[in-house]
Image (spheres, rainbow, N blue to C red):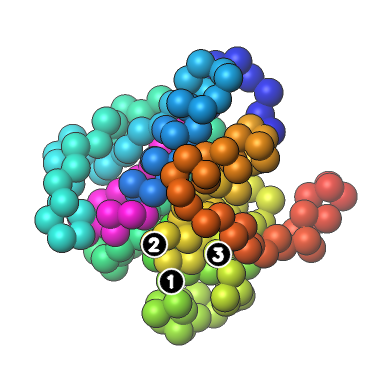
Amino acid sequence: MLNKKSPINIGIYLYENAEVLDFSGPFEVFSTANRLSHIEQQFNVFLIAEDDSHVLARGGFCVSPKYNIRNHPPLELLIVSGGVHEAEMQKVHVIDWLQQQALNVSITASVCTGAFLLAQAGILKGCKATTHWRDIQQFKQMFTTIPIVENVSWVENHRVITSAGISAGIDMSLHLLSKLSNQQLALSTAKQMEFQWNNTGFSNQALEQQHVAT
């Protein structure tokens, strides 16, 4: 839990053909939590894109992110959306930005195939991960040193967490909400959203113990 009175800045990165629920699900979790929280605007959640252009997500869903990768405020939590990610993986300046953010933020997270971007940026080095079930084999082939955990909603490695596909990002975000605030707010948010929160995740205990030891 972060002890601070100012809002916790949560940036959600999206790009062309991002999966709509990958970014809108986590956004809804933290914006709903704001309405239910006893702390005024506990979370400042916003969308970030590569530049100032509108982003066409899956199905032609047109989004106007609030910030780009050059002008957003400092983040405590960065969430990277999944979707049609192949072209995004080849953008050196985006990968560089992800690397820099991972050094500065308290938590770096991905939803669905956003894990490919974290892996490309080297953020998942020494971590376990998960992604959408349809993309697990491709992930294993591309990133042979990153163990994949299957049949869970999220995989947590101290400051890095990845979720499975699409709606699993809501599950992961509720888990993050319980860490950034408290369990009761997460439960109330899930109830308000009428979301069946399973919270079926995997924590990399070896990495947690390594962090405590150092």
Q: Nearer the viewer, residue 154 or 212?
A: 154
- Tell me the magenta residue range: 9-22
The answer to whether residue 22 of the structure is visible from this angle is: yes
Disc 1 crowd rating (10 Å Cα; few below 14, some 14-19, many 20+) is many
Q: Tell me: 14 left or right of 204.
A: left
Residue 214 or residue 187, whichever sits in front: 187
Tag 1: amino acid: His
Give the residue number, with chain letter if any, for mark 3.
Answer: 153
Residue visible at 50% across and 75% down in the picture: 143
Q: Marks 3 and 2: CB-CB under 8 Å?
A: no
Q: CA distance from mark 1 to mark 2?
A: 8 Å
Residue 108 appears left or right of 156: left
Q: Mark 1 sits on what residue?
A: 132
* Nearer to us: label 1 or label 2: 2
Q: Residue at x 32, y 38 (%)?
A: 47
At label 2, counting other C-alpha atoms closer than 10 Å, the crowd grade (few under 14, some 14-19, many 20 or more) is many
In this rendered view, identify the residue nearer to me: 135 or 41.
41
The tag earlier along the polypeptide, 1 or 2, is 1
Secondary structure beneath label 1: loop
State the separation of the CA atoms marked 3 and 2: 10 Å
Q: Residue 166: give its label.
A: 2
How far, Cα to Cα, is label 1 from label 3?
Answer: 10 Å
Q: Earlier in the sequence, mark 1 or mark 3?
A: 1
Q: Secondary structure at mark 2?
A: loop
